[in-house]
Image (cartoon, helix red, strand yellow):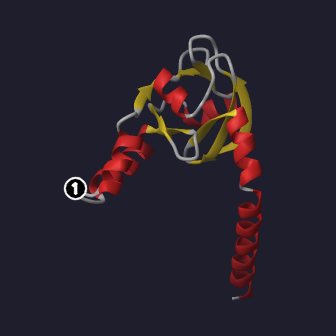
């Protein structure tokens, strides 16, 4: 399972060093990098990506605007990326721009179960600040759900 919060720099060639703990979890996997939501990037093992892309592509008609939006925002910019011998992945200028990740800047790398999120450090800090009250509400709801399931 992919988990943890890490910070690393993007080098002058737009490559990001993945933490060894995450690399060990995805060793040997082909990885797919694409635009995520909330101004981040998503990095998926190819088998997980296949499930998501098939779901998006097969979920609805191409004549529906929301389907086209998801296809254009998530499927179209996706790129296969190899982890080099030094443990880095290349991030295209287009994807860096969409997530506001600066070349030679700091990035936050989050292990989220079966995928990885990559954020510009400033965007991530702003997201955390903006979503604090939502987080507290979600935690409270989760606590209620957990206590209800324990009571059964």
User: Which residue is depicted at the point 62% across and 11% down?
Assistant: 12
Tag count in the figure?
A: 1
Question: Measured from the top left, where is residue 42 in percent x and y?
Answer: 53, 40
> Residue at position x 52%, y 33% from top?
98
Residue name at image x 74 percent, y 30 percent: 7
Q: Is residue 142 visible?
A: yes
Q: Nearer the viewer, residue 147 or 142?
A: 142
Residue 6 falls in image quadrant: top right
Rendered view: 127 above or below 13:
below
Residue 50 x, y percent position in the rendering: 37, 45
Task: For label 1, count other residues whose C-alpha is less than 10 Å away and answer few (under 14), some (14-19) or many (20+).
Answer: few
Q: Is residue 10 above or below residue 133?
A: above
Q: Is residue 9 above or below residue 12?
A: below
What residue would you read off at disc 1? 63
Q: Residue at x 54, y 27 (%)?
A: 96
Q: Taking 100 as reference, is 137 left or right? A: right
Task: Please tell me whether residue 136 is drawn above or below residue 49 in the rendered image.
Answer: below
Of the pair 125 and 19, the residue shown nearer to us: 125
Instruction: Give residue 108's position: percent from left, percent from top.
Output: 69, 34
| Quadrant containing the C terminus in the rendered view | bottom right
């Amino acid at each position: 399972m992919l988990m943890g919060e890490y910070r690393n720099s993007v080098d002058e060639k737009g490559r990001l060093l993945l933490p060894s703990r995450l690399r060990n979890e995805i060793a040997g996997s082909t990885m797919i990098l694409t635009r995520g939501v909330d101004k981040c990037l998503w990095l998926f093992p190819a088998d997980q990506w296949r499930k998501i892309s098939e779901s998006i592509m097969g979920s609805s008609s191409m004549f529906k605007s929301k389907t086209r939006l998801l296809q254009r925002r998530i499927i179209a910019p996706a790129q296969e990326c190899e982890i080099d011998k030094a443990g880095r992945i290349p991030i295209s200028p287009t994807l860096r721009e969409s997530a506001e990740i600066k070349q030679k800047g700091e990035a936050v790398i989050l292990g989220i179960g079966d995928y990885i999120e990559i954020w510009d450090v400033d965007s991530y800090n702003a997201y955390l600040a903006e979503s604090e009250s939502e987080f507290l509400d979600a935690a409270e709801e989760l606590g209620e759900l957990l206590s209800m399931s324990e009571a059964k």
